[in-house]
Image (cartoon, rainbow, N blue to C red):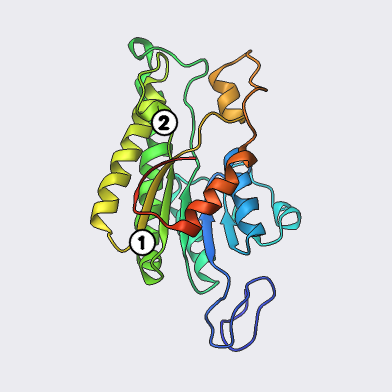
Amino acid sequence: MSEHGSTERSGTGNSVRGEPAARTAIVTGGSRGLGRALAEALAGDGWIVVVDGRTLRSGIAAEIPGVVPVPGDVTDSWHRGLLLETALETGRLDLLVNNAGILGPSPQPALADYPPEALRSVFEVNVVAPLALTQLALPALRDHGGAVVNISSDAAVGAYPGWGGYGAAKAAVEQLSNVLAAEEPKLRVWWVDPGDLRTQMHAEAFPGEDISDRPLPSSVTPAFLSLLERRPESGRVRL
């Protein structure tokens, strides 16, 4: 990417003083489902959106103007560094959306039968990696009074048989978010429950079942954009 300065760079909206007019976000897990829907909504609202995903295609940049693809796995420390580096090439970072996650075994087993190695993987992707990326991003987010959005689930607060592994990971995400909000009062930290959506992950949670009655991920993006506009106090949000 070009140097920051008095020359405006196409697609970034840089001002003559080197400060980009466009806000910049990182959205993990942006190859499909809710992550892609959020990336589309943010880009449509004028944001520069750096997205990642293990199956992310570079062609997404042509499909969604304003999106900068960085394919990779968020559990990889080198990849997390590249995500932040790419975002900061715009000159700022305003928003981190930790959306990437995995369900775990499908069909989901009861806790009595839950493989410990599978549980470790669920926590690595859903809890450890988002925290590690947040740690990297915090200095840049502080510079602009930014926000962290951690995608959660009603499984974090409800006792649903078969959802013990995933639910425990999301409960950990919610408590990490809660403490982060107390430790970073100048930022906004929201842990967001988007509800049941028609996604591949939700289909994996109910193998063989018809989930076509669930709303599409795009149905919650207006509420997400409204959240960013209103900037309520840090806390749990149900879209």
Q: Residue 11 carries which label?
A: none
Disc 1 secondary structure class: helix
Residue 229 visible at all: yes
Which residue is nearer to you in this view: 116 or 126?
Answer: 126
As drawn, is 163 to the left or to the right of 41? left
State the separation of the CA atoms marked 2 and 1: 24 Å
Write down the quadrant of residue 201 in the picture. Answer: top right
Q: Which amino acid does label 1 sit on?
A: Leu
Disc 2 secondary structure class: helix
x, y percent for residue 130: 40, 46
Tag nearer the camera, 2 or 1: 1
Q: Which mark is residue 122?
A: 2
The crowd level at tag 1 (other Cα within 10 Å; few <14, some 14-19, many 20+) is some
Query: Where 101 falls versus 166 (above or below)?
Result: below
Which residue is nearer to you in this view: 149 or 67?
Answer: 149
Residue denoted by label 1: 138
Residue 30 visible at all: no
Which residue is nearer to you in this view: 100 or 182?
Answer: 182
Query: Where 90 falls versus 179 (above or below)?
Result: below
x, y percent for residue 113: 37, 11
x, y percent for residue 96: 46, 55
The crowd level at tag 2 (other Cα within 10 Å; few <14, some 14-19, many 20+) is many
Q: Which residue is drawn at 37% across and 29% down?
A: 156
